C-alpha cells in the first residue's frame, strides 16, 4: 500500500518537505508548525500497487485556532520501534520518530 494526501481537491497532493510528512507505515499526515496556508480540506488516498486499486477517505478540515489554546496533549516523543529491525547489508532501513505536542 502507498499513502498520499490530497490538499483541498485533486490533483493537489501534499508535498513532503521539512514541515510535512506522510507515514508510509500508518498513512498518517504530520504537519509541524501549522501555518495559515495549511488551512483547508485533507483527503487520504490509499493505493494498492499490485491491483492498481485506489480508495480515498472523506475530507478532513484543518482549522487554524487563533485563541492560543494548543489542545489537550502535552509534548511527547512518539516512537513505535520494534525491539529488533532485521536488515541485509547495504539495504535501507527507515525508522519513524515523531515529536508531538
Image (cartoon, rainbow, N blue to C red):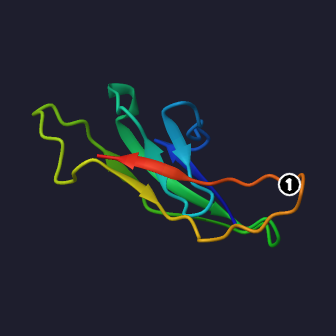
Along the horizontal axis of the image, is 20 left or right of 75? right
Along the horizontal axis of the image, is 69 left or right of 49? left
Residue at 55 percent across and 40 percent down: it is: 14
- Element type at mark 1: loop
Question: How far across and how far down the image is residue 93, in percent?
Answer: 74, 55
Compared to residue 39, the image places residue 25 above or below, namely below
Question: How far across and how far down the image is residue 2, in percent?
Answer: 68, 60
Furthest toward the top, the residue is 36
Question: How far across and how far down the image is residue 91, in percent?
Answer: 86, 54
Residue at 43 percent across and 61 percent down: it is: 58
Q: In front: 80, or 25?
A: 80
Q: Which residue is label 1 attached to?
A: 91
Compared to residue 15, the image places residue 5 above or below, namely below
Q: In front: 63, or 28?
A: 28
Residue at 34 percent across and 28 percent down: it is: 35
10 Å crowding of disc 1: few (<14), some (14-19), many (20+): few
Compared to residue 47, the image places residue 17 above or below, namely above
Which picture quadrant has residue 15? top right
Which picture quadrant has residue 65? top left
Residue at 60 percent across and 63 percent down: it is: 25
Which picture quadrant has residue 39? top left
Question: How far across and how far down the image is residue 23, in percent?
Answer: 57, 54
**Image label count:** 1
Amino acid at each position: 500500500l502507498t499513502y498520499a494526501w490530497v490538499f483541498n481537491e485533486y490533483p493537489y497532493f501534499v508535498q513532503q518537505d521539512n514541515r510535512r510528512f506522510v507515514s508510509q507505515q500508518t498513512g498518517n499526515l504530520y504537519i509541524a508548525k501549522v501555518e495559515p496556508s495549511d488551512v483547508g480540506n485533507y483527503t487520504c488516498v490509499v493505493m494498492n500497487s499490485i491491483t492498481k486499486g485506489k480508495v480515498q477517505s472523506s475530507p478532513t478540515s484543518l482549522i487554524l485556532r487563533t485563541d492560543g489554546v494548543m489542545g489537550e496533549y502535552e509534548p511527547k516523543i512518539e516512537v513505535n520501534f520494534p525491539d529488533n529491525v532485521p536488515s541485509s547489508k547495504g539495504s535501507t532501513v527507515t525508522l519513524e520518530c515523531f515529536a508531538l505536542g
